[in-house]
Amino acid sequence: MTDVFSAINGRTSANNFDPTHAMSVQEIHDIVELTNQTPTSFNQQNWRLIAVNTPAAKARLKAAAYNQPKVGDAAVTFVVVGKVGGHTDLPALIKPMLDGGHLDQAAYDGWIGMANGMYNGKDQLQRDEAIRSASMAAMTLMYAAHGKGLVSGAMIGFDPAAVSAECGLASNEIPVMLVAVGRAAPGNWPRKVRRATADVVSFSAD
Ligand SMILES: Cc1cc2nc3c(=O)[nH]c(=O)nc-3n(C[C@H](O)[C@H](O)[C@H](O)COP(=O)(O)O)c2cc1C
């Protein structure tokens, strides 16, 4: 267990993973459970993870990821998948809040109506939202792994069509990122340089 500041300052991208390290389904589940707390627009939860953790599946995913060795070496590589049009799942997703008395019918209908008003017919925005949500989830996943004493490595270096085919993604699903998770092997880089803090913030005018 680490505190938030240590996690933010301590996480780095790993390239070298211990290839002898395996994770149990329960260990993977624990990280996914933490990742599942990621917030999304309207709580539409338009992302999911595919845990690639067997030698054969890792080898196939590695081939689709330009043979990046970490996909084969890490205990698990998660395919972080974003869903286009995920707002249409909202009626079912938030129904438990209606049934549980946390929302009345007017608030429930209003919530869904606002989401439909925002996304219906807007293909680019729906795609943006899929990538936004999946990216948020990927970050939570990396911190969850860090909190478990593991390392992670995000990847955009893969062939999206090959990953989609390998994972059997639906036509409205996007492979947004791969995130390798496992135990570190020696030789990883320390935290890389960042821009000066003053360069990444500006303040509003009066
Ligand atoms: C969206 C994203 C995609 C990345 N893709 C790759 C990749 O394909 N291969 C790789 O070795 N590193 C990849 N990285 C790791 C970055 O190079 C790394 O996060 C960056 O250099 C900062 O290093 P740090 O995470 O250790 O601070 C990716 C990182 C992010 C956030």
Image (cartoon, grey):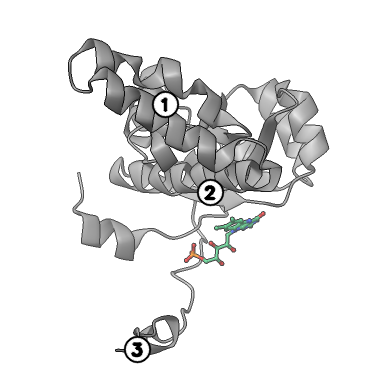
Residue indicated by mark 2: 132
Could you tell me which residue is drawn at 34 percent across and 15 percent down?
95
Q: Name the front one of labels 2 and 1.
A: 2
Q: Quadrant of residue 77?
A: top right
Label 1 sits on residue: 28
Q: Residue at x 35, y 84 (%)?
A: 204
Lower position in the chain sequence, tag 3 or tag 1: 1
Does residue 57 appear to the left or right of 46 in the view shown?
A: right
Q: Tag 3's secondary structure? A: loop
Q: Residue at x 75, y 30 (%)?
A: 164
> Where residue 67 sits in the image (x, y, percent)?
77, 45
| Position of the N terminus by quadrant | top left
Q: Quadrant of ligand 1?
A: bottom right
> Disc 3 versus disc 1: distance between alpha carbons?
46 Å
Determine if residue 8 is in view: yes
Label 1: element kind = helix
**Amino acid type indicated by mark 1:** Ile
In the figure, 200 relative to 13: above or below? below
What's under tag 3, amino acid-wise?
Answer: Ala
Sequence-first tag of 3 and 2: 2
The quarter holding residue 5 reads: bottom left
Mark toward the start of the polypeptide (2 vs 1):
1
3 or 2: mark nearer the eye: 3
Q: Which mark is residue 141?
A: none
For residue 131, above or below residue 87? below
Identify the residue position indicated by label 3 in the image: 205
Residue located 29% across and 56% down the image: 7
User: Visible in this render: residue 49?
Assistant: no
Q: Distance of mark 3 from mark 2, alpha carbons?
A: 28 Å
